[in-house]
Amino acid sequence: MTQALPHHPAYLIPGDEVDGWRVVERVGTGGFGAVYVVEKEGRRCAMKFSLRRPVSEDPARTDARLFQREVVILVQLSHLPNVVRLHACGRYPDPVEGHFYIVMDYVEGDTLSAWAERHSPTPREVARLFARLAAVLDEAHRSSIFHRDLKPENILVRRRDSEPVLLDFGAGDFSMAKPLTEGPLPPGTPHYRSPESLRFLRQNRNNPEARYAFKASDDLYSLGICLYEALTAKDPFQPGQERPRLNMEIELRVPPAPHELNPRVPAALGDVVRRLMSKSPHERHPTGEALRRELEELATMEDAAWDKPIHPPPVPRESVPVAVVEPSMPPPVPSTPIRRARWSRAAALVGATVLASAVVIPWVRGGASSPQEFPATAPERSPPPTVRT
């Protein structure tokens, strides 16, 4: 007798099948989602579920909207080599009202922070890695797509070739997309928000109609924070303090430059970080492409300091098994700050083949049967489609 599948995706076990994908193991469960390693026709992938259905008790349908938004954005960007890519999407167990899921390649790798800690890269390697991230952001921004939640946990460094992979676009934005939150600011992680966004929040806290217009400079600022942390293994601000105090610190305080905290960091690379973290967006790099060019130029420097590890070699220890990154779709106001201990968590996720816009829209609106599979080749870049939320 065939055992009935559970109605809730959090209770799937190895051997269960979801739309032809066989569950191998569960690798992460959180308040917003669950992630499993799955296999189909010899292909091993990661399957990420929303733990709430579109008709659940969540009146804002936040989880469903985050999943819908991530799919639509990845349709536009996953032809890029450093962006997570899709295999399929659907709903479970009911093809119309079930929990949303996304299928992506399972790739061994580490979060940016874990990579910096374990690999102890050189300044040259860091510059090249961030040049690739800058190129990805430039492509996204040219299509009016913004990530809006850049942080080390959302940057995977692939183990086999040390290439960065940008993931988790659930909080992202694109042309004509509706707001995800009711307050002035979009979703995001507090200590990666730009000073100008927090200034807008302070000035419009009592204005229910105010909505911050997220820009490329906001993403570049967040990338600068990521680079700062990779070079220093320190937070530029204190994320554990009360939110008003943290916001004011981000608005007003200029943290020490990376090369002042870590003498292994070349001053030229530290200056790039200082520019990215400028309090005024007009003082930052105007585009991701401008940042990419500067980082690529620095990566060609002949000074021997560029080939010395930026951190002392790590103390040898037992290897830690690699797992898929836990779902990290951010709520509008995260309740727990990201601490350095989470840097050592191994991660993995994603890659392969993009979906045509005409395929994704019916699924997002609930008008198509589940699942949706993606074609084998990526289409030419097209304007982002509109999602009915």
Image: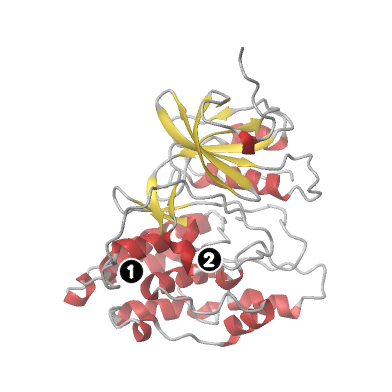
Confirm whether residue 358 shows in the render: no
**Residue 47 location in percent, x, y?**
53, 37
**Which residue sits at x=69%, y=67%?**
185
Dot 2 corresponds to which residue?
219
**Which residue sits at x=72%, y=57%?**
179
Give the number of the disc on residue 332: none
Q: Nearer the viewer, residue 363 or 328?
A: 328
Q: Residues within 10 Å of mark 2 (few under 14, many from 20)?
A: many
**Residue 237 location in percent, x, y?**
53, 79
**Residue 258 location in percent, x, y?**
38, 80
**Which residue sits at x=54%, y=82%?**
279
Dot 1 corresponds to which residue?
295
Q: Amino acid at mark 2?
A: Asp
**Residue 134 location in percent, x, y?**
42, 62
CA separation in Å, label 2 and label 1: 17 Å
Which element carries disc 2, helix, strand or loop? helix
